[in-house]
């Protein structure tokens, strides 16, 4: 059973819109899961202080890939 947050009446499970007032029950559920995800991400971030280090490592990795791609392009251009 889903209790409508607007009118407080019970709707059967899987109901997308409240049968009594038409409130979007599905939208509410999605919002709740999104909030949970955000909370999980936030708690994970506070638990691991090395996230910044990981980020900089990732950035360095991307820069290296970028340099390799540019060098490869230059080589292709020279030997064309
Ligand atoms: Zn309702």
Image (cartoon, grey):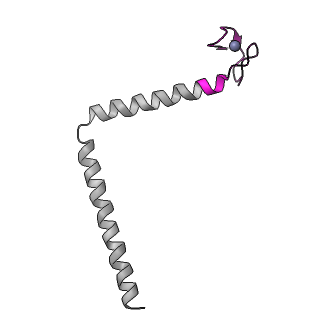
The answer to whether residue 12 is magenta is: yes
- Residue 51 shown left or right of residue 15 in the figure: left
Indicate left or right for 19 with 62 as reference.
Answer: right
Residue located farthest toward the top when viewing the structure as drawn:
8
Residue 69, compared with residue 60, is above or below; it is below
Residue 32 percent across, percent down from the top left:
53, 25
- Magenta stretch: includes residue 6: yes
Image coordinates of residue 2 in percent, x first then y, are 65, 15
Q: Residue at x 27, y 42 (%)?
A: 51
Name the spot of residue 42 as percent of width and height, x first.
35, 31
Span of residues in magenta: 1-28
- Residue in the picture at 50% in, 31% down: 34
Foreground: 21 or 68? 21
Q: Give the residue displayed 43% in from the left and 31% down from the top.
A: 38
- Residue 17 found in image quarter: top right
Residue at horizontal 64%, vertical 12%?
6
**Farthest residue in the bottom direction?**
79
- Ligand 1's quadrant: top right
Q: Is residue 44 above or below residue 12?
A: below
Quadrant for residue 78, please give it. Answer: bottom left
The answer to whether 13 is drawn above or below residue 71 in the figure is above
Magenta segment's dominant SS is: loop
Q: Position of residue 18 (x, y in %)?
A: 72, 17
Q: 67 or 48, which is in the foreground?
A: 67
Query: Which quarter of the rendered picture does the C terminus lie within?
Result: bottom left
């Amino acid at each position: 059973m889903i209790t409508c947050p607007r009118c407080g009446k019970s709707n059967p499970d899987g109901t997308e819109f409240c049968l009594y007032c038409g409130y979007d029950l599905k939208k509410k559920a999605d919002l709740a899961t999104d909030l949970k995800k955000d909370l999980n991400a936030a708690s994970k971030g506070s638990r691991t202080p090395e996230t910044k280090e990981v980020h900089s490592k990732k950035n360095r990795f991307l820069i290296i890939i970028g340099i390799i791609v540019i060098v490869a392009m230059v080589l292709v251009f020279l030997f064309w």
